[in-house]
Image (cartoon, rainbow, N blue to C red):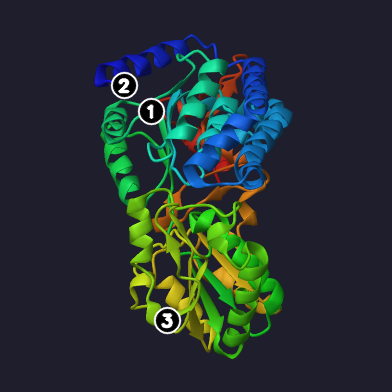
Amino acid sequence: MTEQEIKALVAKQRTYFQTGATLPVRTRIQALRRLYTAIRENEKEIHDALRNDLGKSNFESYMCETGLVLEEISYMVKHIQRFSREKRVHTPLAQFHSRSYQKPSPYGVVLIMSPWNYPFMLTLSPLVDALAAGNTAVVKPSAYSPHTSDVILHILSQCFDPQYVAVVTGGRAENTCLLREHFDYIFFTGSQAVGKEVMRNAAEHLTPVTLELGGKSPCIVDQTANIPLAAKRIVFGKYLNCGQTCVAPDYIYCHRSVKDQLIKEVQKQIQKQYGSQPLDNPDYGKIINEKHFDRILGLIDKAKLVQGGRSDRETLRIEPTVLDHVTFSDAVMQEEIFGPIMPILVFDNLDDVIRTINGMPHPLALYFFTSDKQAAKKVTSRCGFGGGCINDTIIHLATAEMGFGGFGESGMGAYHGKIGFDTFSHYKSIVDKKTWLDLPMRYQPYQKLHEKMVRFFLK
């Protein structure tokens, strides 16, 4: 799509939004129900596309992508009437006699830019929230997952007129053109480097943004943890989608006394979950492209390899890999891995762990395996991170009752459920003042009596 076509598209959506056509709650519910039906009808095509782009099995595609979008739609349809109501708030005595309330209103024309690692879910979930709030939307899926982008284009074109919801495919040129336009809100999921570029462009129009980024999410395992269960859940979270998950445990920070036991249990779980030949497992995903394949292989230090490490360039697969004796100066600790490599570091004192984590850029997620409730409280209170789990991984993002988002270098803002509705809404604060009474004390000329009355009301 050319720059002129993008400009015309945004202008068309703004004109449509200004007609008020997206404001009725009934219209929003109908839109979400159309989307729900289209997803169900195209489920096979969605899963085929995800297999072509990322090697995902049908089960994983439904569990981590399609099913989560359907759940978000169902949640919004159920609750949107309540979310969109005006909320009356207390009116102070000084404003007698008035009605004060907050009115949720859509921003207008929003831009949703999504990544390639969960290309369906991370495109459609924020779109659901944006439509529930009453916005129009321009959706820009990733060029790295072209099969899924084509399916998204097909589904959204089937459901919506482009003046309401439109899809712009393409790569960097289209991204640049979109970011030059004046949107009312921008929702971006992706890397920190591109997130900075999004903020720079948004600043030109003072456009508010939500940034869902990433980072090196730690997974702490202390000496009180249930090690077999910890290994099982860590292996699931780390190697899901071949490690290409923004909230995957990036590295394991393990108490020295249980490290050897943890490694043995992790090795058992890799064998159990992925088989003795993971590269031949049809349900094990692949790296998105050769560029990332080479980058990830470059992070494997063979001298520290204790599990996996083999790869297949033809299928772009890398075995679930474990590195031991890793330090914070190693190459694998200098960037977000975003691949199936599990570095294991050790600690002796939990206070040192907290200091180390807080001395690094704030991660998107943090996981802590422990049986010590006080230790869990200490870590979750003192460490800065977006969200996480105690004694599990990943699952905190799979509920509409909690917002999901980053903190500091891992992003800003959140979405899912009510918080997603709030993200795409501006809350207008309104006072409805009655006309039958008009107190004179605020008007000049000011008098001593009026000053006493103001002091009485405002204290």
At x 63%, y 65%, the residue is: 275
Q: How would you rate the neighbour count of disc 3 (Cα within 10 Å): few for under 14, some for 14-19, many for 20 or more? A: some
At x 43%, y 51%, the residue is: 213
**Residue 329 appears left or right of 371:** left
Q: Amino acid at mark 2?
A: Met
The secondary structure type at the circle numbered 1 is loop
Residue 304, label in figure: 3
Residue hosting label 2: 1
Residue 180 x %, y %:
27, 29
Residue 163 x %, y %:
45, 13
Q: CA distance from mark 3 to mark 1?
A: 42 Å
Is residue 430 in view? no
Q: Amino acid at mark 1?
A: Thr
Residue 169, label in figure: 1
Q: Is residue 332 above or below residue 175?
A: below
Q: Quadrant of residue 337?
A: bottom left
Q: Amino acid at mark 3?
A: Lys
Mark 1 and mark 2 in contact? Answer it, CB < 8 Å.
yes
At x 66%, y 17%, the residue is: 30
Q: Please state which of residues 148 and 216 is positioned toward the viewer in this rendering.
A: 148
Disc with the residue nearer the chain's start (3 vs 1): 1
Q: CA distance from mark 2 to mark 3?
A: 48 Å
